[in-house]
Structures are given as C-alpha cells and as structure tokens.
Image (cartoon, rainbow, N blue to C red):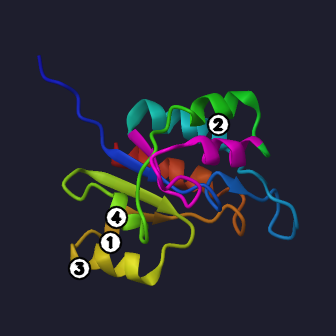
Amino acid sequence: MKKLVFKKLYLDLDGVLIGKNSPSDINNAIAKHAEDFLKYSLKNFDCYWLTTHCKEGDNRRVINQLSIYADEGILSLARSIKPTSWVTLKTEAIDFQSDFYWLDDKPLGVEIEILRKRNLSDKLIQVDTRRYPDDLRRVLGILKQIN
C-alpha cells in the first residue's frame, strides 16, 4: 500500500492568521476565514509554523500569541501545527527537498532571493490579512488548486 505524502505548508502568524477586521482598524484580530483555512490546511498539508513566535522548535509562544485573538476552536487547530527551528532567516527551517509552500506577509528580501536562486519563487504565497482582511479566502482558493 502506497503511503500518502502531503505537501508541506509553512505558516507565518502575524499578517496571516492575525490580521485586521478592516485595514483602517488599529487593533489586530483573528483573520477572517482563519478556521476554514486551518481546517483545510491541516487536512491536506503537513503544516509547520514559520514565524518569529516559533523559532526554537517550541510552539508555546505562537499559541500564546494567537490566544489573545482566537477562540478555543482555532487554538485547538493551531496546536496541531508543528514547530520549526531557525536562527536568522525563516528559510533556514524550510525543507527544500520537499514539495512545500510558504505563506508569509513580509518575507525578507534575502529570503525571497534564496527562493529565487533555487528556482522556488513560486513556492512563496504572500498574504496580508492586515491590508486585505479577506486574503485567506484568496489563499484557500490557491491551496485548493495546488492540491
């Protein structure tokens, strides 16, 4: 029997799952469509945190940050996302040998260049739920096309 191999999905927190209800809001909020996005992603991808809130292989800080905005349903889903370890650049945590996608609102120029040099620029999906509160709906459509 053939084992299913899921594509990896690397997730930033701020600007992806934590956004705004409106671009003019001063306060952050859980991103619109976050629960549907997480349910689909966890069912169809091997999900990893790739955020400054989770750098040392421990997802407690990211869950604590998310708990400011999210209800228990979203937190329960978020706890299923695996932690990563990296020091300087988020790309240090990406398994370039795997089939992956990375969701981030503001990747560094050097991180974008690393992807470009490896011909992997198409693996980065830029998301900004602060400027575009419904952006996770767009991303969900992209992920459904990928799978």
Mark 3 neighbour density, 10 Å: few (under 14) some (14–19) many (20 or more):
few
Mark 1 is on which residue type? Ser
Tell me how far mark 2 sits from mark 1, CA to CA.
27 Å
Image depth: mark 3 or mark 1 in front: 3
Q: Is residue 56 magenta?
A: yes
Q: How far apart are the alpha carbons under marks 3 and 1? A: 8 Å
Query: Callout 1: few (<14), some (14-19), or many (20+) C-alpha neighbours within 10 Å?
Result: some
Q: Tell me: residue 26, above or below residue 35.
A: below
3D distance between C-alphas at marks 3 and 4: 14 Å
Q: Residue 52 sits in which quadrant?
A: bottom right
Q: Is residue 125 above or below residue 107?
A: above
Q: Name the element at disc 3.
A: helix
Residue hosting label 2:
35
Residues under labels 4 and 1: Cα distance? 15 Å
Circle 1 SS class: helix
Image position of 125 (left or right of 91): right
Residue occupying image coordinates x 60% and y 50%: 137
Judging by the rendered image, the residue that carries numbered circle 3 is: 117
Give the residue at mark 4.
92
